Image: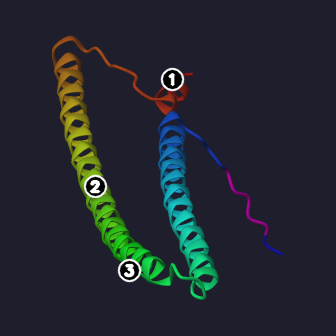
């Protein structure tokens, strides 16, 4: 029977990425909860207005209440349009944020590659002119023992 062993290594970079993801998810969850609360409050208000409509339909104030219902429906329609705008704005901001993160990652990779090549050039120069060798990894340190 074949038993596979897996190693799990956490680096500071992976911990930073995980924490960034957790913070983003927490913020998104908070926003979703706020939107859900707003929608629930609107539904409760609509429910109360319907109850008032049923109670007052038999009373003399029925005409006034009908006007209130019409205004409430208009208000609800405006709120739904605003919610759609806010959701679209959120999606646009999220896409912009992801685009900016991609650009930052590309810049970091570019700077790292430039620095790495500069270090290699310096190592080659020192080795060629002075015979000086720089040990830059654990494996090379073990080879000398």
Placement of the C terminus among the 4 image quadrants: top right
Q: Quadrant of residue 88?
A: bottom left
Mark 1 burial class by Cα count in 10 Å: few <14, some 14-19, many 20+? few
Foreground residue among 58 and 112: 58
- Taking the view exactly as shown, the residue that stands out farthest to the top is 130
Mark 2 burial class by Cα count in 10 Å: few <14, some 14-19, many 20+? few
As measured in the structure, the alpha-carbon distance from the residue carrying label 1 to the one carrying label 2 is 54 Å
As measured in the structure, the alpha-carbon distance from the residue carrying label 3 to the one carrying label 1 is 86 Å
Q: Earlier in the sequence, mark 2 or mark 3?
A: 3
Relative to residue 58, is residue 127 depicted above or below?
Answer: above
Relative to residue 17, is residue 53 depicted above or below?
Answer: below
Residue 53 in the image: state x and y as whole percent: 56, 81
Q: Nearer the viewer, mark 2 or mark 3?
A: 3
Foreground residue among 21 and 9: 21
Residue 78 falls left or right of residue 73: left
Residue 130 falls left or right of residue 75: left
Tell me the residue that label 3 is attached to. Answer: 70
Q: Which residues are magenta?
A: 3-7
Tell me the residue that label 1 is attached to. Answer: 144
Q: How is the image coloured?
A: rainbow
């Amino acid at each position: 029977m074949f038993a596979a062993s897996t190693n799990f290594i956490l680096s500071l970079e992976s911990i930073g990425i995980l924490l960034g993801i957790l913070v983003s998810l927490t913020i998104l969850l908070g926003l979703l909860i706020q939107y859900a609360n707003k929608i629930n409050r609107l539904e409760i208000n609509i429910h109360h207005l319907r109850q008032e409509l049923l109670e007052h339909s038999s009373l003399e104030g029925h005409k006034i209440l009908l006007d209130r219902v019409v205004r409430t429906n208009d208000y609800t329609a405006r709120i739904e349009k605003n919610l759609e705008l806010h959701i679209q704005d959120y999606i646009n901001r999220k896409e912009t944020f992801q685009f900016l993160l991609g650009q930052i990652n590309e810049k970091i990779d570019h700077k790292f590659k430039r620095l790495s090549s500069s270090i290699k050039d310096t190592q080659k120069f020192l080795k060629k002119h002075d015979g000086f060798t720089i040990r830059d990894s654990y494996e090379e340190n073990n080879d000398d023992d």
